[in-house]
Amino acid sequence: MSAFFKHQPPRIPMNRILQRYLQRFARIIGSWSDSITYIDCFAGPWMSRSDSHEDASFAIAVNELRAARDDLARQKPERPAIKLRCFFMEKDKSSFERLCEYVDQISDIEIEKKNAEFEESIDAIRKFVRSSKAPTFPFFFIDPTGWTGFRLNIIQPLLEMKPGEVLINFMTEHIRRFVDSPDPATQESFVGLFGDDSFREHVAGLKYEERDDACVTKYMQAVQAKGRFDFASSAVVLHPEKDRSHFHLIYLTRDRRGIEVFKEAERKSMEDMEAARARAQQRKRVQKTKQKEMFSGDDVTSTHFENLRERYTSQAKAALLEQLKTMGVVEYDVAWSNALRLSLVWESDLKSWIDDWRKSGNIQLRGMKPNQRVPKLGQHIELVWNQDSTL
């Protein structure tokens, strides 16, 4: 693990998920596409702990895209190298100047940078994507410092671009505090975020995790509808020192394989995040008590992550069970996409539920091949509810 991931400013675990996703994304897309266009709409750098900005999202993207391009070139030397293109947007002048210090040293990637508001640059971004001489696949990373500056109806033209994928940092910590503020200007800003005012009825009266879940679900549904994406999912980023959610990453794609890669990036990043949180919490305790602890932070187990994962897996399991009881038959692919929408729910969880239900006689699997033990995507396998089930 890179040194800059050993401590955990709020954006570090989020960037870890981004990094792991781009590692696979760039190789998969680069295996068939002539070009990849990466668009960072709030490039920063923000909270960078390195003079070289290696922990900033734009540097992570550049490094992973380069690595994928070089790997593919070694594997298939007869094929032209994939064309890499980047568009970096940053409105803050001083941050933009630091961004330029990094970007201006790059000569092997086509880069456009712009010191401007994101919402005022939608046409410029679309023009850059479409100006590619070779067919290109755009990936949009939207990482704001709050909940304004990317109103849903304004950014819709980017969401609609095909092909294309989107990763949005949903600032849960801030949104939780202000989403039901009586201030008219604040409420109007949330209308811009969600696209309309229907979010109000979804969060009214809710607190804590329930409010977080309602906000994330409503926003994910709204973005998916605006961009007409086939699949959506979320990943939680926990507060480094407190047992609560800090951010949620909202991921949108039109290819099921993208969800597989995103969820794998989420799963692998959780171990890093929990170890970093344990160290941060231990440092805080030591500073408060002035006494060293017997075990290192890495050896301390937090129950918050386990409780949160139990919460989301239970929700997904209950929803599928209700769907089976109501409909009688649910295709495995549908059950998969619904379950993996939630943070911290993985395909192994879904297969475990199905295996338990099948062994207990509550469901049958229709469409399985002879000697096939587990259902797989794309095989039109159906989960058939046993009407005599006592569940």
Image (spheres, grey):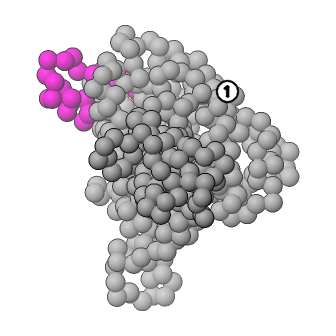
State whether residue 11 is above or below residue 122: below
Mark 1 is surrounded, within 10 Å at the Cα level, by few (under 14), some (14 to 19) or many (20 or more) other residues, namely some
Magenta residues, start to end: 67-88
Badge 1 element:
helix
State whether residue 360 is above or below residue 303: above
Q: Which kind of residue does numbered mark 1 sit on?
A: Ile
Q: Is residue 9 visible?
A: no
Q: Can residue 193 be seen in this view?
A: yes
Q: Where is residue 248 in the image (x, y as percent from the top left)?
A: 55, 51
The quadrant where residue 142 appears: top right
State whether residue 185 is above or below residue 246: above
Residue at 48% x, 26% y: name it.
Answer: 164
Left/right of residue 96 with respect to residue 76 in the rendered view = right
The residue closer to the viewer here, 58 or 377, is 377
Residue at 50% x, 46% y: name it.
Answer: 383
Residue at which label 1 appears: 154
Q: Position of residue 303 (x, y in %)?
A: 49, 74
Residue at 61% x, 54% y: name it.
Answer: 387
